[in-house]
Image (spheres, helix red, strand yellow):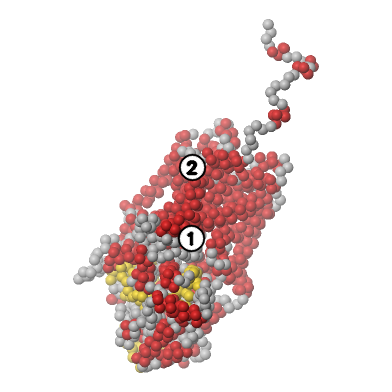
């Protein structure tokens, strides 16, 4: 009996040891982590400062992570930042955005602008990945496809083309003949675009994915973007492997017109949506870059990473604003004084320094830094001094406001936010400040994303968390959303003066006067009415290995890896 | 001489009443039980009391429960902290005399929060486990006992309920009902009892063809008596193991809901949600994870050890 | 037997129908739709999208259309992942979960049963205590903590194993370990508890008295009866593990079906929600079905009865 029992024990032991050995085997042999280190995943951080002479690494494989899988590789259908990263690598628009936010030639060699009329001269050596030349007709085809009311599913970003003459009408079936829409291929290499009105930021939009060309073979084939073998692209890289939910692999396009300036041979993207895991694998040498815009560095770790990673950690302001919006039709925030009191009673610097920790900038306006003004940035030319933080003043305003509205005590207030660690922390910090500084108890309630959006968009809230990112580099992308009945005007704000200022700015050719209108409108929005309570201007926090060079970030925080390269260390 | 006693025995025919005499007690006296009768539960309690490990676990559980209700109040009185007030100048500070368990990412005292979290976790875990037990045992018992068509239909119903995506139900509940602790408990129990019912069903199916059930049945025992006096007590082992596991399961499920942003509403926290919050930075602020994790493990450990003790004490088959 | 199976199969179809109906209406009752987004698309485009996906019709019509499609084996296309087939998404993401899950199930059952048996055979001895401490730890520590700890120790510190991904055998080790911690503990406890019961049963004593060898007793009586509860647990466990653990998939970056499902629910991607639910339902019912059959083989006392009393 005893002998047999020991037999069982032995069996268990053997199993256990076997597992252990298997685990150890990976250490001695060609463990995945070790082989991955081949192209420089070495953990010892080298100083990136002294880059006198750069030697390219032999293996030019870039490894990055996308925290969400792009829902599509069809530029006409895309609408998220992950797709943006990938599509920018696979397609070449008329122009590209360089580091400083200037439009530089891409598929178009040069262009002439005459008021509302743009003429793009396409380069003659540009070809698709199958060798076909890229022509002006490809652009017309792609734009027609986006605007065509019969395209299935309806491209959500078709309104990005509404600047073009008759585009909106065609999209809404008021014009049925596409030849009336202001886009035309004069010849194979000349594209003529006529806009509704002069639009200073239209050139910048031509580097946006909705305006990318599409190969005409996709006609009548709705599922082309699902099948990598059917994907014909004109950009720097082609899609060579896509394992759903696991990895996306891009390989250099040898037919690309500027292939000599493309040094990366492969880009491997993993699809992990845990920020802690992403950072761990970056530190483990399995990724070359982590953090924004495709992932996130966990807030808690930023202060420590500043010491640990030093120059590898980058913080860069981007053109987005984090704010709380008041429902101006709901009690008690239908009173401007009460809104002001709430906005003045918090300490933004304390939130930025101790809660968000990512070097964000306290916000007192709505248009963030990074958005172009006349000569410089809009924010530099127009200071955001619409109000100041002042607890005493806030208390007084609250009292006055309550008197005006006839309250002896405030109604119950709930602040809603969508579930996320970061939003939760900010909401708790703000509610705590309101309690301490104004003596007002505010409930905080997190809601599931779609539920939250539903409540906010239908006005079923009092005060809600919000954020807005630039669609293009102009104050308009922030200002026109607050017009009466604007699609994204979730505060239900309505002000005739404001509407007039924005309407004027839309057709205004005098840029200085246009700028003046924005300034006045912002004064109404924030200074007079305090429809929303700005908290901070966003930053991108990311970590880049010192041997990875040439990664470009634009004003909105979008990333461009196409000209990146890896150096020998 | 003949010493064979048989020989002296008179033949029955010769017996007379005088030949008999009383030995020992009266018949009637013999019927009286001298030792006090011990009910199954008292018997179990006695055996449980002898199990030192289980009793230690019970004491720990009682202490944790007491601390969860008293500690926040007491420390609040002495230090003037509460579980929700922020102190942004003292975020992520390690344990000290002022903050025994350190502070969290908003500078809140971790000691108070940990015990408050324990309170919430205990409420969630115990409430969910009790409901699971109640529904699961009755449902599973009926399924297993009656078998046949009843079993088939009830089993199908639980299977369907089990296969309806739990998240859909939870989100719907949280949207339709006020987001509160009660809603979360409801969301946890709506499918939580099914596992218990299956365990019970399996046990009963196995037991009901045994000899003692047959014996009882042939002596005229009704269904209710059979089920509650014979079958369920014999299935108590697996039931208790399942219950002691359904407490941590409920506590962890709540943590999972927090992981998806559907857990208890901040600033209220549960142990699970605190660990979850601490997870991304635990390398640098270990105390934020350590204290709630130790407490949650302690609670689990105590539940399990106590559960084992209870099982040994209750199980009639393990009687010496 | 054939009748039994046919009967079960019929019930499965009925259950499936109820499951589809319940989930469909439940799903539609939740606020939001696939086209809810922070930057609202113009109303005209939104309406066109509703029309193209049939969301403009009354819910009951959508329901009947869906039922019709499913009967013909058409699960439709995703509303979020543009033009991607639901069945293809399920098969691709499920393959990862299945591979991981099968390994995890084998590990959990083998290790769990062995631990439990050892513990019961050495009742109240060191091995028993050690095994139970292990089991309790497995239950007492949340899986996301286990996963993070494993990741930190074996990937970040020791560099033995990769942090994330799913590209080869090595990538299985950590997720499987994290995934099985709890089932192992559960199985070990169940096995131990029921083995103890069996070891004290009269028929074991009889068998011993008959002079049956220890190995024979174990294999013929103890193990067979001792793992009964494990089999009960196997059904739900298999379904649970194979359908993917969201937490594990998230932490180790494995594109499994669990992650996909949560994503679909939060995105209100109706065809995917339905597709995965049906898929889950079938899996679960099959698992239960097999469990029931397994009972019959393991425990001859359970009779396959139909109707009346058993």
Taking the spot 48% from the left edge, 54% from the top edge, the residue there is: B70
Tag 2 and tag 1 share a subunit: yes
Q: How many residues crowd around disc 2 within 10 Å: few (fewer than 14), some, or many (20 or more)?
A: some
Q: Quadrant of the C terminus of chain A?
A: bottom left
Q: Secondary structure at mark 1?
A: helix
- Which percent across, then down, holds residue C181? 45, 52
Depth check: A437 or C176 in front? A437
Depth check: C217 or B77 in front? B77
Q: Is the C-beta separation of discs 2 and 1 under 8 Å?
A: no
Q: Secondary structure at mark 2?
A: helix
Residue of label 1: B256
Counting residues from the start of the chain, the first of labels 2 and 1 encountered is 2
Identify the disc placed on residue B53.
2
- Furthest-top residue in this view: B1
Q: Is residue B143 above or below residue C216?
A: below
- Which percent across, then down, holds residue C143? 45, 56
> In this orientation, does residue A32 appear?
no
Determine the image quadrant of residue A12: top left
- For this view, does B202 lie left or right of residue C176? right
Depth check: B41 or A130 in front? B41
> In this orientation, does residue B268 appear?
yes
* Residue at mark 1: chain: B
Please state the total of marks drawn on the protein image.
2
**Which of labels 2 and 1 is toward the front?**
2
- Furthest-left residue in this view: A52
Taking the spot 34% from the left edge, 77% from the top edge, the residue there is: A554
């Amino acid at each position: 009996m005893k002998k047999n029992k020991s037999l069982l024990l032995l069996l268990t032991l053997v199993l256990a040891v076997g597992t252990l050995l298997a685990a150890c085997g990976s250490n001695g042999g060609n463990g995945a982590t070790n082989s991955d280190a081949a192209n420089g995943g070495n953990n010892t951080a080298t100083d990136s400062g002294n880059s006198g002479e750069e030697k390219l690494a032999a293996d030019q494989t870039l490894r990055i992570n996308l925290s969400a899988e792009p829902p599509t590789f069809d530029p006409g259908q895309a609408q998220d930042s992950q797709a943006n990263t990938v599509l920018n690598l696979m397609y070449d628009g008329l122009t590209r955005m360089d580091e400083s936010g200037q439009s530089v030639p891409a598929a178009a060699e040069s262009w002439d602008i005459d008021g509302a009329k743009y003429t793009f001269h396409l380069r003659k050596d540009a070809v698709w990945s199958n060798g076909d030349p890229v022509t002006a007709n490809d652009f017309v085809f792609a734009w027609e496809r986006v605007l065509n009311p019969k395209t299935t599913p309806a491209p959500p970003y078709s309104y990005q083309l509404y600047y073009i003459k008759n585009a909106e009408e065609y999209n809404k079936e008021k014009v049925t003949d596409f030849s009336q829409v202001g886009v035309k291929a004069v010849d194979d290499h000349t594209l003529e675009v006529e806009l509704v009105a002069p639009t200073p930021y239209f050139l910048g939009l031509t580097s946006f994915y909705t305006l990318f060309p599409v190969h005409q073979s996709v006609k009548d084939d709705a599922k082309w973007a699902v099948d990598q073998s059917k994907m014909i692209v004109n950009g720097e890289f082609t899609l060579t492997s896509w394992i759903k939910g696991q990895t996306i692999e891009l390989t250099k396009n040898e037919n690309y017109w500027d292939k000599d300036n493309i040094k990366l041979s492969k880009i491997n993207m993993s699809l992990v949506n845990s920020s802690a895991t992403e950072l761990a694998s970056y530190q483990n040498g399995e990724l070359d870059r982590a953090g924004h815009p495709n992932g996130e560095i966990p807030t808690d770790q930023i202060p420590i990473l500043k010491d640990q990673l030093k120059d590898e950690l980058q913080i860069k302001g981007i053109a987005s604003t984090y704010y709380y919006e008041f429902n101006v039709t709901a009690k008690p925030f239908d009173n401007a004084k009460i809104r002001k009191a709430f906005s003045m009673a918090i300490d933004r610097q304390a939130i930025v320094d101790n809660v968000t920790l990512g070097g964000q900038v306290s916000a007192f306006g709505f248009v963030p830094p990074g958005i172009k003004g006349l000569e410089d940035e809009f924010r530099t030319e127009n200071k955001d001094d619409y109000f100041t933080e002042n607890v005493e003043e806030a208390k007084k305003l609250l009292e006055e406001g309550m008197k005006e509205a006839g309250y002896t005590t405030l109604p119950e207030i709930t602040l809603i936010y969508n579930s996320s660690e970061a939003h939760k922390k900010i909401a708790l910090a703000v509610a705590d400040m309101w309690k301490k500084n104004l003596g007002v108890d505010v409930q905080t309630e997190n809601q599931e994303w779609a539920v939250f959006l539903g409540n906010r968009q239908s006005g079923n809230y009092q005060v809600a968390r919000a954020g807005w990112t630039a669609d293009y580099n102009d104050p308009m992308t922030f200002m026109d959303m607050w017009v009466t009945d604007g699609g994204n005007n979730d505060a239900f704000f309505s002000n005739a003066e404001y509407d007039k200022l924005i309407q004027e700015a839309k057709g205004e050719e005098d840029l200085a006067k246009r700028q003046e209108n924005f300034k006045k409108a912002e004064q109404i929005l924030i200074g007079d009415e305090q429809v929303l309570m700005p908290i901070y201007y966003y930053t991108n926090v990311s970590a880049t290995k010192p041997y990875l060079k040439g990664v470009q970030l634009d004003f909105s925080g979008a990333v461009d890896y196409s000209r990146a390269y890896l150096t020998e260390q | 001489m003949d010493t064979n006693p048989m020989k002296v025995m008179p033949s029955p025919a010769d017996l007379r009443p005088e030949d008999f005499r009383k030995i020992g007690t009266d018949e009637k006296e013999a019927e009286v039980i001298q030792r006090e009768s011990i009910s199954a539960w008292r018997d179990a309690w006695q055996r449980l009391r002898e199990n030192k490990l289980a009793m230690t676990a019970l004491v720990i559980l009682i202490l944790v429960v007491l601390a969860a209700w008293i500690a926040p109040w007491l420390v609040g009185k002495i230090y003037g902290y509460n579980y929700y007030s922020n102190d942004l100048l003292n975020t992520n500070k390690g344990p000290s005399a002022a903050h025994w368990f350190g502070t969290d990412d908003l500078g809140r005292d971790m000691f108070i929060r940990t015990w408050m979290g324990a309170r919430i976790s205990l409420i969630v875990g115990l409430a969910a486990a009790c409901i699971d037990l109640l529904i699961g045992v009755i449902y599973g018992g009926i399924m297993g006992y009656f078998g046949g068509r009843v079993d088939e239909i009830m089993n199908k119903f639980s299977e369907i309920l089990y296969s309806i995506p739990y998240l859909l139900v939870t989100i719907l509940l949280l949207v339709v009902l006020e987001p509160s602790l009660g809603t979360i408990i409801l969301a946890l129990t709506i499918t939580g009892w099914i596992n218990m019912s299956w365990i019970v069903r399996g046990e009963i199916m196995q037991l009901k063809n045994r000899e003692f059930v047959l014996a009882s049945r042939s002596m005229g025992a009704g269904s209710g008596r059979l089920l509650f006096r014979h079958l369920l007590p014999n299935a108590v082992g697996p039931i208790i193991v399942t219950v002691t596991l359904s407490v941590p399961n409920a506590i962890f499920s709540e943590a999972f809901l927090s992981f998806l942003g559907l857990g208890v509403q901040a600033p209220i926290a549960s142990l699970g949600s605190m660990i979850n919050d601490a997870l991304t930075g635990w390398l640098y602020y270990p105390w934020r994870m350590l204290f709630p994790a130790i407490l949650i493990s302690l609670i689990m450990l105590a539940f399990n050890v106590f559960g084992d003790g209870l099982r040994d004490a209750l199980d009639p088959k393990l009687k010496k | 037997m054939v009748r039994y199976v046919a009967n079960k199969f019929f019930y499965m179809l009925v259950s499936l129908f109820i499951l589809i109906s319940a989930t469909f209406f439940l799903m539609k009752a939740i606020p939001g739709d696939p086209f809810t987004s922070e930057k609202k698309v113009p109303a005209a485009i939104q309406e066109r999208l509703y029309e193209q996906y049939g969301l403009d019709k009354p819910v009951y019509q959508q329901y009947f259309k869906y039922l019709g499609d499913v009967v013909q084996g058409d699960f439709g296309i995703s509303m979020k992942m543009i033009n991607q087939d639901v069945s293809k998404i399920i098969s691709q993401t499920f393959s990862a979960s299945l591979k991981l899950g099968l390994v995890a199930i084998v590990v959990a059952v083998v290790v769990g049963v062995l631990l439990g048996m050892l513990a019961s055979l050495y009742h109240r001895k060191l091995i028993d205590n050690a095994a139970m401490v292990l089991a309790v730890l497995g239950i007492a520590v949340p899986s996301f903590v286990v996963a993070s700890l494993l990741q930190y120790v074996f990937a970040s510190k020791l560099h033995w194993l990769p942090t994330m991904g799913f590209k080869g055998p090595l990538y299985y080790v950590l997720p499987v370990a994290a995934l099985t911690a709890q089932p192992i503990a559960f199985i070990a406890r169940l096995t131990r508890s029921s083995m103890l019961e069996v070891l004290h049963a009269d028929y074991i004593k009889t068998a011993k008295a008959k002079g049956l060898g220890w190995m024979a007793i174990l294999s013929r009586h103890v193990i067979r009866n001792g793992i009964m509860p494990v089999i009960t647990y196997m059904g739900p466990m298999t379904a649970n593990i194979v359908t993917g653990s969201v937490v594990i998939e998230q932490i180790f970056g494995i594109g499994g079906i669990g992650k996909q499902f949560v994503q679909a629910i939060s995105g209100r991607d109706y065809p995917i929600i339905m597709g995965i639910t049906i898929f889950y339902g079938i899996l679960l019912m099959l698992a239960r079905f097999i469990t029931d059959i397994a009972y019959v083989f393991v425990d001859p006392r359970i009779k396959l009865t139909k109707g009346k009393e058993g």
